[in-house]
Amino acid sequence: MIISTNINRNLEIIKKELVDCDDIVYRPIKVGQKQNFNMAFIYVDGLIDKELISEFGLEPLLLDARENKPNPQNIKDNLLELVEKGNIAVSEVKELKTIEEALENLLIGETLLLIDGYNKILMLSSRGWPMRGITEPQIETVVRGPRDGFNETVKVNATLVRRRIRDTKLKAKYIKIGTRSKTDVVVMYMEDIVNKKLIDEVMKRLKGITVDAIIGSGQIQHAIAGNSYSPFPEAQYTERPDVVAAALYEGRIGILVDNTPFSLIVPATITTLLQSAEDYYGSWYISSLVRIVRFFAIFLCLLFPALYIAMTSYHPGMLPTQLAIYVAATRDTVPFPAFIEAFIMEGTIELLRESGSRLAGPIGTTIGIVGGLVIGQAAVEAGIVSPLMVIIVAVTTIASFAIPNYGLASGFRVLRFGMMAFAAFSGLYGIMLGLLLLATHLVQLNSFGIPYLSPLTNIGNNLRDLKDTLIRFPLQTMKKRPYFTQTIDETRMPGARNQGKKGDNSKDKKK
Amino acid sequence: MMKIDNKITSGQLMAIIVNTIIGVGILSLPRDLVEALKTDGWILVLISGLLAIGSVTLITILVMKYPGKTVTEFGRNLITTPISDFCSILFLIYLLIFSAFVVRIFGEIVKMYLLRNTPIEFIIITMLITVAYIARAGIEAIGKFCVLVLPIVVIPIFFMGFVLLPELDFSNLLPVFKFKITDLLKGIPSTVFSFAGFEVILLFNAFVERPKKTLKYNLIGMVLIIFVYLFVFLISVMVFGVIETTHLIWPSMSLMEVIQFPGAFLENVQGVVMAQWVVLVFSTLAPLIYGSALIFDKLFRGNEHKYYVFPLMPIIFVLALVPDNIATAYDYIGKSTNILGTFVILVLPLLLLVVSLFKKNNKKGAVKNG
């Protein structure tokens, strides 16, 4: 809709458009020594920095314009320019040409200034709403490492990343997603590192999202996933700016979403999902140890109850004799087959986890202790489950928390029940079939065209990524960026390359 | 983007070859070798291995001439459609019999070591359904899968030797070089067929993305297999001795029963070995069944192998249950590989290669004349 030159008409149109929106404030004013120029401010109450607007928008127009003698010539003709360039002391001022544009800006938190006699509306940048400060990340805590985490404002989040990359090649593209919510999404990448095809694919998929509202980054994650039926996440979430920055240096892409502290990093592979920020802050021995522990945690989380079922119901002969006798003795009073027993306990634990996470902090812990200890103890004493089963369930649950990425952990958590069913079905053979089906699914899975299991699914250059998989080699040995992102600029340590050249030269001299 | 649609790398092809070859053949190999040449069986492995390498080189040279095409497709240009299609059908039958044999032996072993009371039909059906999933997924998935499981397949075999170190008796390998040349020649065919499986190159090279290094990788794969076979033979003979080895159906499996971890969690490692065994057979069956579906598809000049995977399953299932027992199963596969296998591994590639050389010369001649 085109803006008319009549201010009252414009106001009417806007008011009609925003009827019943009582949080919109209209502030008509008269400017000039004779108070003969009609103007109006419009803003959303609560979304703007009121002090800014009254001090640097209203005050100069109302007071300064009256006190200073106006330049007599052509005041009326140049009013817009005079106001825009001369009066308003706000850092960002923009001319808007349509009502739709004006409304969109109004709802973001900008202030509109309507001036009588002009078919343009001035937008004064005034965004300022209550927001959480930069606090320590809640989920990804580290012992040693930066303590700042993302908050719900995407501009702040982008700044936190920018602070870590002082390079002109860091690009931040703003796009709006959601036909109604118009959520700001910032796509960050290093222009001379990231693979062009990757960034094109990400932008294509982001622009292809057709949804009315984006509430959190999870929606975007699922909307841009290639296989929406997979239990595994195709993007990595994080609330740590240092993790995003490190990922950008590796040639990956950060997707920051407004209104949520959780940003996305793509592409994600199973190896990157098992990495934690801290791995790169500590020594490589301890990092490798925790990596191995995490891989083992996946194994436990997925298979431990299933193995129990298989061993007790199908292959007791595989256990050491003493253990087999012990298991048989403790299961003597248990009236259920191992499969039912395992399902009862796993079900109970899932119940506890769910109710624990619903309750407020301290009560949740209490429920955990009461539920875990009391029910476990009572169930064993009542002879419903064997003590070994309680241990297994506890270890399984702990293991699921050792996986750094919650999405990945939940995938395995769900599949655990499938594995238990396979084990009940035909023992170890069933488990192997289940694992083969899982492997078949995983080798087919791609995250933005990058194999989910890389670097484990090819023989060639990609093998250098193994240095950062199960064992994290010393950082000095990782002279190149990861292979899986197919970066343009592969060298991470240009200095190291020069050293190599020097070495070559000296050899030549010797010759 | 970097998603390689229906493409594999040379490295993945190598993994597919290794996984296809190391299947059920490895189980009875030490016995076959000992029966043929006693303690000198390793010579047979080396010679047969060299022959197999020769054949692989031959096949690779042939397929490299026709990048992006399977044998069913380029064969039509070389030896006319009816003859080529007939050859492809023979290839298909060979693959089906091979798969059926593998899945039958697999069923027998799982039944023997893992699920004693389960009917073998159940084991075969569940395995075939699981394989069908990856066979439908296509070459890309199979390539990645084979690389993924390559360490799981190969490393434990060498690890086994390390664990069995206390049981090894090196004097069992003596005497050396006391064999008759006639025995050696007689033993070669059956041993060469324990390397069978590499003929899938005829089909799968079509999907290799940058085929430059294919020959190199294929040869590395073959050398790796020779090492594995040699290793398994030496370990079996050193542990059991010549006479005992001849009496075992599957000497390689019996080795597992000897293994004892002092103070380990598991009483016997059979469980772990069986787990590895399931993976091994799965990675053998997947390329074979995918290959059969692919031939079927190309015979009908189609572009979607998926629809042919499930119809093949009942055929393989029935074929697998034809032999009454393990002995007849080995008998059948021996007979069929002697005829069909020789045809697929040697006759067909050689024929096509000769014809292709001929055609190329003709073309060159034509250009010169023109």
Image: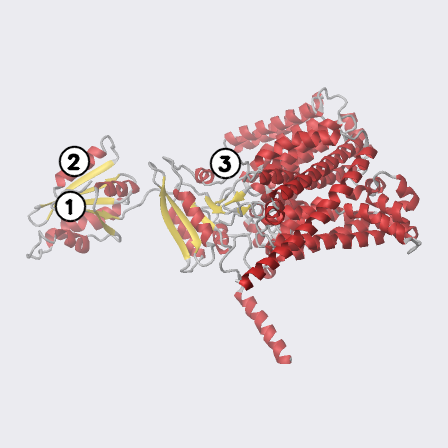
Residue placed under numbered mark 2 in the picture: A12
Residue at 72 percent across and 33 percent down: it is A428
Report if the CB atoms under discs 2 and 3 are less than 8 Å apart.
Answer: no
Residue at 33 percent across and 42 percent down: it is A129
Colouring method of the image: secondary structure
| Label 1 residue SS | loop
User: Relative to residue A350, is residue A11 depicted above or below?
Assistant: below
Neighbor class of circle 1 (other Cα within 10 Å; few <14, some 14-19, many 20+) is some
The picture places residue A176, in percent across and down from the top left corner, at 35, 43
Residue A466 appears anywhere in the view: no
Quadrant housing residue A439:
top right
Residue placed under numbered mark 1 in the picture: A119
Q: What type is the residue that disc 3 sits on?
A: Ser
Q: Name which of mark 2 and mark 3 comes first in the sequence.
A: 2
Q: What type is the residue that disc 2 sits on?
A: Glu
Between B56 and B161, the one nearer to me in the picture: B56
Q: Name which of mark 3 and mark 1 comes first in the sequence.
A: 1
Q: CA distance from mark 3 to mark 1?
A: 48 Å
